[in-house]
Image (tube, grey):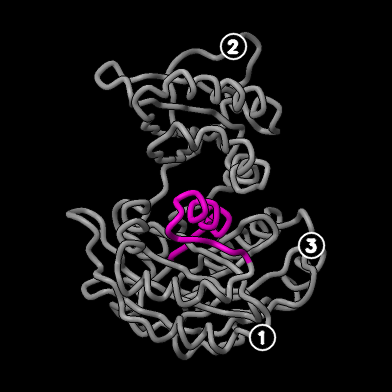
Amino acid sequence: MTITSERVSEELTRQVSKVSQSVFDGSRLRVVLLVDVYDGAQQQFLEAYEQLCNQVASVPGHVSDQLCQSIENPSQWLITSEWESAPPFLAWVNSEEHVRMVQPLHSCVRDTRSLRFHIVRETGSLPAGARGEERRLQSSPRIGDGLIRHALTFTVKPGSEPEVAKILANYASPEAQADGTTRLCRTSLFMHGNRVVRAIEVRGDLLAALRHVARQPEVRAVEEAINPYLEQERDLNDQESARVFFTRAALPAVHHVTVGELPEAERHALYYPAKSGQGMRLAEALAQYDEAAAEDRGSPVLRSTVFQRDDVVVRLVDMRGDGGGASVLPGDGQAAELKKLLDGAVVRMDLITDRRSPDA
């Protein structure tokens, strides 16, 4: 039996970069929030922070937090918090409760940047009587591919779907390079019914890429064109209105696995309607399925990303062109397992546009 160089390369890829991103490994989470406060608003900021702290203390999964002020620039602040694991933090930060909690901060904060990290190693001794496993550290570092995956989702008014699809499909691609280190690599846009999902891949700084894209005239024109059709109204000329819309539209990637690369791979998006309150559990079940499928050398799936916010769960799949579209749908065994968490059938979303940036 002859083993081709292509198969050897594929096997090495599977061994080296099987899972590049996941929030479901159970390790503790460190959240870092960089804050730029308006001059003269420090006391107002402190009062708003104290109020927020009292509320966050009762959120399930929250362990502790710390507020720091820069010794070089008093307008710069750092908020760090520790969580038992990523899922409870994501459930809170993506909730309407969080939107209400942080409202008092907006009038005194010029800019923010949020970073989330699993704790891999730490120094210091354990508390008396504690066991090593109670540290809940990430067991081993993950191997990534340098890409940040994120998505936005929103709904449009029923009956407007054909017009919205036409607008979204016929826009001029924005300049890919945001700055010297940040580049927009790929944008894939899907629809199912009146729900729109826009998945992006960024190399560099996600926030810098999103701000760069939002400033591009061609993108701004598309956003203005679909404004009349949105179920949630927004005013892009009003900073607070735009911020609230995009906060609610954020659809974070909670798991990603890569087992191979092919330029001609087909891209599919599957929408999983979760039962009320079961979105995170459903996303975790799909993540476990994808990790197990990565071990199957006969699987046509090359990459899979699970996006989740509340009860909206979307799975983006890249697969070999000869794999057969039905292969991205769950098999009988998986369908039975997921049925407990689903509020309806899994559906394939319609691809509106899929664009790669040059040299991506």
| Residue in the foreground of this view, choosing between 313 and 194 | 194
Marks 2/1 in contact by CB < 8 Å: the verdict is no
Question: What amino acid is labelled 1 in the image?
Answer: Gly
Disc nearest the viewer among 3 and 1: 1
Marks 3/2 in contact by CB < 8 Å: the verdict is no
Find residue 110 and report its horizontal and vertical position in percent.
38, 37
Q: Which circle marks residue 189 in the picture?
A: none
Find residue 122 and report its horizontal and vertical position in percent.
44, 24
Q: Residue at x 36, y 71 (%)?
A: 219
- Visible in this render: residue 303? yes
Find residue 125 and report its horizontal and vertical position in percent.
50, 12
N-term mark: 3 or 2: 2
N-term mark: 3 or 1: 1
Find residue 85 and report its horizontal and vertical position in percent.
60, 37
Q: Which circle marks residue 275 in the picture?
A: 3
- Kindly state the secondary structure of the residue where label 2 is placed: loop
Q: Residue at x 31, y 52 (%)?
A: 208
Instruction: Give the Cα separation between the discs numbered 3 and 1.
Output: 25 Å
Q: Residue at x 50, y 61 (%)?
A: 235
Disc nearest the viewer among 3 and 2: 3
Residue at which label 1 appears: 159
- Kindly state the secondary structure of the residue where label 1 is placed: loop
Q: Which circle marks residue 127 in the picture?
A: 2
Q: Which residues are magenta?
A: 232-258
Question: What amino acid is labelled 2 in the image?
Answer: Pro
Is residue 353 rendered magenta in the image? no
Question: What amino acid is labelled 3 in the image?
Answer: Lys
Instruction: Determine crowd level at label 3: few under 14, some 14-19, many 20+ residues with C-alpha closer than 10 A.
Output: some
With 308 as the anchor, is 221 left or right in this view?
Answer: left
Disc nearest the viewer among 2 and 1: 1
